[in-house]
Amino acid sequence: MSRMLLQRGHSVYIIDVNEEELAHTVNVHLKDYPKRFSAICDVTNVDQVRLVAEDAVRKLGIVDCLVNDAAIARPTMANPMTDYSTWDEYNKFIQVNLISAFTVSQAFASKMAKDGAIVHISSTRWQQSQADWYVHPFVVSPSNVK
Ligand SMILES: NC(=O)c1ccc[n+]([C@@H]2O[C@H](COP(=O)([O-])OP(=O)(O)OC[C@H]3O[C@@H](n4cnc5c(N)ncnc54)[C@H](O)[C@@H]3O)[C@@H](O)[C@H]2O)c1
């Protein structure tokens, strides 16, 4: 999506918590596009998100579109109902996949163009019934971002 926007002449500001993956995306996949900007940012850290929103406006001038694709997509927990050690992972899932939708929207909304758009990427996984997955965070979080 970033490449497509850059190819059409737009500027893109990418954030990710994973430094290695972000550097690879920016320096390998998008190396030919000077109008790409990036920053390490954890979307569960409200202060980081607000700082990045300010930096994005400084670099881009105006933000026309915000795409929130941050997610933990591959859970490792085997049985959240009986294994108490999964609580931290469950909580992190909800923070990243659900609460960050509000965090990033709030940080960017007042800085966006009047006809700007905010897109949250979610999943249809919540519609699929599966044994042991009824309270699974990958089912619960997208069911609230729909
Ligand atoms: N991959 C699929 O088949 C598929 C299908 C349907 C919907 N989706 C949806 O697309 C979205 C992204 O999934 P994906 O498959 O591209 O996952 P992915 O793991 O490839 O990408 C998610 C990105 O979010 C980043 N991230 C994780 N925690 C973060 C944090 N705290 N702060 C900032 N960045 C963070 C990761 O580093 C990663 O780069 C999810 O909402 C998922 O439900 C994916």
Image (cartoon, rainbow, N blue to C red):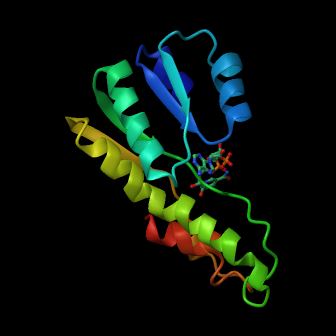
In the displayed structure image, the side of residue 79 where residue 97 appears, left or right: left
Q: Quadrant of the C terminus?
A: bottom left
Query: 51 or 8: which is nearer to us?
Result: 51
> Would you identify the image quadrant in which residue 49 lies?
top left
**Image position of 68 with respect to 87: above or below:** above
Where is residue 6? Give x, y as percent. 49, 18
Residue 83 horizontal side relative to residue 128, left or right:
right
Please report the residue visible at 33 percent of the width from the left and 22 percent of the height from the top. Answer: 58
- Position of residue 2 in the picture relative to residue 27 (left or right): left
Residue 56 pos. (x, y %): 39, 28
Residue at position x 54%, y 69% from top?
Answer: 141
In the rendered view, would you say 18 is above or below 89?
above
Residue at left offset 25%, top offset 36%: 111
What residue lies at 37% left-to-right and 36% top-to-bottom?
53
Residue 2 location, x and y as percent?
A: 53, 28
Which residue appears farthest toward the bottom when viewing the image? 82
Q: How many marks?
A: 0
Seen from this angle, which residue lies furthest left?
114
Image coordinates for residue 123, horizontal then vertical, percent: 56, 61
Q: Please state which of residues 128 and 111 is positioned toward the viewer in this rendering.
A: 111
